Image (cartoon, grey):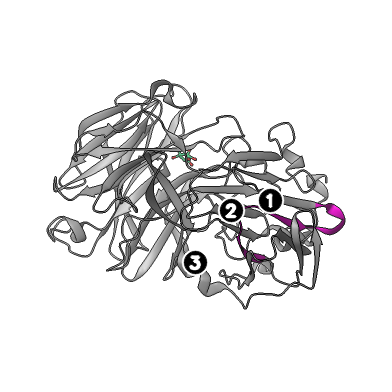
Amino acid sequence: MNAKNITLEDLRNRDRMWRPACHFTPALNWMNDPCGLVYFHGQYHLFYQHNPSDADWGSMHWGHAVSTDLLTWHDAPIALFPTDPEGMAFTGSAVVPSEKSAGAGWNGEPDTVVAVYTGAIQRTTPLDNHQRQCIATSRDGHTWVPEGVVLDNPGIQNFRDPKVGWHPEAGHWFMVLAVERNINIYTSHDLRSWNQSDTITVSTALPAGVLECPDLFPLPVMNASNRTEWVLVIHVENVDPADPGAYYTVGSFDGHRFLQTYDAFLPIDGGHDFYATQSWANMAPGDERRVWIAWSANSAYARRQPTSRWAGVMSIPREIRLRYMDGRPVLCQVPLRELASKRRSSVEPVQQRFTSAGLSRYYRVENSSAWDILVEAKSCRILLSFGSAGFITIYRGQRTFTIDRTACDMGRFSGLVDPVKTIVLYPDCGEKPLTRVLFDRSILECFLDDGHRATTDLVFPEVPLQGIVVAAQLYDGVQVFPLRPAMHRDTDRF
Ligand code: FRU
């Protein structure tokens, strides 16, 4: 379709077909990385990289939404604007000092949330010295006061995306920062004055490309009592589009230096579209979970999405854990358990028949755009049917998992992405073999077993979902839940 000939009705149709109902999207215009994820004053805050004047990357602000359950988000006014002299508000994080540093708060104020982010001055020549780490403070999480640069640029082009955390044993703050092909660690007692304590060089352990959006946090290991490992997360920009570019490794961290336990960095997600993940700095009191969210996109083609009035979708928030498998701790991700509260009653198949793949159950899709499908089976086939436009096929075998988007694919990105992708499963599937599929108009997330494998893919079918087919053995457990919309935004108002 010629962009010039797009009518308002076309735009509305695109929203109806592709605007997810349970995943966060910006009301209008461009969104990329999640930023400043924090719980403050009874609300979860989701800030995000946002260009408020175009559905393409551009002048970076921090867009803002709040939630009490991490699923139903309410738009809030823009939190951070580009300023002089800080420049654009690139990615960063936020913390609540009074919770950690012995109640010291911020400048004696107990009730403050502090954002640490990259101020980026738009300058092309010379390219260095233009990314510095800045802070902004807020008393309510909504109105922010920029307080200037706290870590200046030593003459390096790519020097960004500070993620700040608290090290309980060392009793100080730390910051991980992406610096070209390294991750630098800095420490601080007041979030203003920072000293470098380590440089982690990834050398050839990762595909070539600039590093972005690091994160570092402790996680208990599920099947090893009292054992906790530190997880270092790294993203690599513009890798092969078949690889979303999100990696992790585990190690020990004494507050100053990170020591990798295993050489390898493992991919976080087996799909194409999972990038710039960030974990919440804190959760509601008493909630010990580590939850993260990612920008569901691939940096290789993120700017070519066809949604038009808005661009960008976040993954469903995921609880993350570690589990020993194959002799090392493996990151497991499962959708936030509160998502179950969005389920309507499970639907029954309208037709069943025996096929070579087992009992094939057909579910009719009426009105609901989002689905949560659970299949307890060693092998199964799940087809998302788009009528004459074809199927998305999801196949779980004994050792492999394949998503085939050929019929309903990213044709618009052809040449960049192979519509068929197969990943290898771990031999030990934990308690039970479970394939869980979340489909929400233009995003498909799959979780295997206890989440030791997850895939995230964008899909832009030309027609809405019409039916779901699940083929598995007669005795295998199959549940198909329509999901109630979590977002209550009237997208037709624009
Ligand atoms: C990652 C990223 C970050 C940067 C931000 C700018 O997607 O490139 O490194 O801070 O986006 O929007």
Tell me which amino acid carries mark 1.
Ile
Q: 10 Å neighbourhood of mark 3: few (<14), some, or many (≥20)?
A: many
Q: Would you identify the image quadrant in which residue 28 lies?
A: bottom right
Nearer to the camera, 466 or 63: 466
Nearer to the camera, 105 or 296: 296
Left or right? Give the position of 413 relative to 197: right
Residue range of the region highlighted in magenta in the rendering: 370-390
The residue sitting at 44% across, 50% down in the picture is: 332
Whichever of labels 2 and 3 marks the residue nearer the N terminus, that label is 3
Tell me which amino acid carries mark 3.
Leu
How far from the left and from the top, in percent, is residue 183? Answer: 33, 31
380 in magenta: yes
Q: Nearer the viewer, mark 2 or mark 3?
A: 2
The residue sitting at 69% across, 52% down in the picture is: 307
How far from the left and from the top, in percent, is residue 441? Answer: 68, 59
Residue denoted by label 2: 446
The residue sitting at 38% across, 49% down in the picture is: 323
What's the CA distance linking mark 2 and mark 3?
18 Å
Relative to 349, is 471 above or below? above
Secondary structure under tag 3 reads: loop
Q: Would you identify the image quadrant in which residue 282 lies?
A: bottom left
Q: Main secondary structure of the magenta part?
A: strand
Label 3 with label 1: CB-CB less than 8 Å? no
Label 1 with label 2: CB-CB less than 8 Å? yes
How far from the left and from the top, in percent, is residue 114? Answer: 28, 54
305 in magenta: no
Whichever of labels 3 and 1 marks the residue nearer the N terminus, that label is 3
Relative to 255, is 387 above or below? below
Secondary structure under tag 2 reads: strand
Residue denoted by label 1: 394
